[in-house]
Amino acid sequence: MNKSLNEITTGDIRGYLAHCKLVRHNTDQTINNKTRMLRGLFKWLTEEEYITKNPMLKIKDNKVEHRVKEVFTDEQITIVKDVAKEHSLRDIAIVDFLHRTGVRISEMVALNRDDIDMHGRQCIVYGKGRKERPVYFNGEAAVHLKEYLESRIDDNPALFVGSRAPHKRMTDDAVRVMLKSLSEMDKRLNGIAINPHKWRRQFVTELLEKDVPLTLVADLVGHNNLNTTKDNYGNYSRSKAKEAHRKYVS
């Protein structure tokens, strides 16, 4: 804009967002993401007294169509886990850990072996803003994790490492690539997205289906905003409606 930060106005911001919409053809969701980032930036600039007036205060988000994000069916979960188990001890350990803890991918790859309390089936992760929270896993996940760790011959402290020497700590991208490769190993999984966040969504949906209170679900997955947790209500409601139909109509 060729202006100093303190000279940028609400009109300038609106002009930029209009340019993104009309010239760059950004979607409403993309523009909302840009707005959110700008909101965070100018809030910080105001708090640190780099600027005297926050030009973002009057900028609102665009209304976007809310689409229910898909979760796995029971059959798909069984197939994915069978494929992962066949492929390697590490892969089934990762899939089960994601499914049974609901952790973010960044939280999982940061874990070390010593962080795992196998007896208590729990560990401590550090979420957004380095916020600490305990996560728990079931017996099945514990068995797969123990088998994988006992099979390791490397001395890397990381919980999950690459399958090839020098066995470096797995990154977010490495886990995503591994999960995607599972869908290519069985034709029944063709077109099925298998990614870390879908397992997190699966975890939340399954808890809601078991009538676990929303606030407790939010605590378990580290959501600061209940609306983030509520995004899974679409899957939850759809599942309940299907269950009711089978029970009372079929």
Image: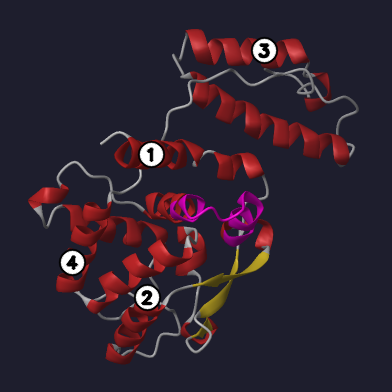
* Residue 212 belongs to the span the image colors magenta: yes
The magenta segment is 206-220
Identify the amino acid type marked 3.
Arg
Measuring 30% from the left and 33% from the top, which residue is drawn there? 249
Depth check: give the residue in front, 224 or 164: 224
Disc on the earlier residue, 4 or 1: 4
Q: Residues within 10 Å of mark 3 (few under 14, many from 20)?
A: some
Q: Residue 50: horizontal and vertical position, in percent?
A: 86, 35
Q: Which residue is mark 3?
A: 14
Disc on the earlier residue, 1 or 3: 3
Q: Which residue is mark 4?
A: 82
Q: Secondary structure at mark 3?
A: helix
Identify the amino acid type marked 2.
Ala
State the residue lying farthest toward the front.
Answer: 248
Depth check: give the residue in front, 126 or 199: 199
Disc on the earlier residue, 3 or 2: 3
